[in-house]
């Protein structure tokens, strides 16, 4: 299982289409907080106001489905049931997990 953020995945989502084409049975757990959180935290650590770090509510589960894989959107409370459900598939799976944005501790640069 690969755990990724929505910001990072949005830059490389073509890789999911490659996984579908290669029939790789991978699972991607996408932590969707609708932001480039790492960038926001780096800006905060540098004493800068965050700018350009909010994302729209992209339906990454639908992107996965459109690519020929399995896409599921869920919440933390529903995640255990979703994880049990995907054990039966051989296609690449993307789980779009809606999470609250939280500030991460950062070091001053």
Image (tube, rainbow, N blue to C red):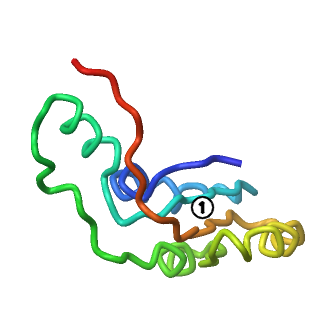
Q: Where is residue 74 in the image (x, y as percent from the top left)?
A: 63, 77
Residue 95 placed where, x, y %? 63, 68
Decide: is 3 above or below 6: above
Residue 44 image-quadrant placement: top left
Residue 39 falls left or right of residue 32: left
Residue at the (25%, 46%) spot, across then down: 40
Please state if 107 lies on the left or on the right of 59 as rendered: left
Residue nearer the viewer, 24 or 99: 99
Tell me which residue sits at (22%, 18%) in the image: 109
Which residue sits furthest top?
Answer: 109
Callout 1 crowding tier (Cα within 10 Å): few <14, some 14–19, many ≥20 = some
Left of 5 or right of it: where is 70? Answer: right
How many marks are shown on the rendered structure?
Answer: 1
Measured as percent of width and height from the top left, residue 87 is found at: 87, 66
63 or 4, nearer to the observer: 4
Residue linked to disc 1: 21
Rendered location of residue 85, percent (x, y): 85, 75
């Amino acid at each position: 299982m690969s755990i990724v953020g929505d910001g990072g995945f949005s830059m490389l989502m073509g890789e999911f289409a490659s996984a579908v084409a290669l029939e790789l049975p991978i699972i991607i757990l996408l932590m969707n907080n609708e932001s480039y959180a790492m960038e926001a935290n780096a800006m905060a650590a540098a004493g800068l106001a965050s700018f350009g770090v909010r994302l729209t509510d992209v339906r990454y589960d639908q992107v996965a489905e459109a690519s020929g894989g399995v896409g599921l959107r869920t919440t933390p409370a529903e995640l255990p049931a979703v994880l049990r459900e995907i054990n039966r598939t051989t296609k690449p799976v993307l789980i779009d997990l809606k999470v609250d944005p939280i500030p991460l501790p950062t070091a001053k640069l």
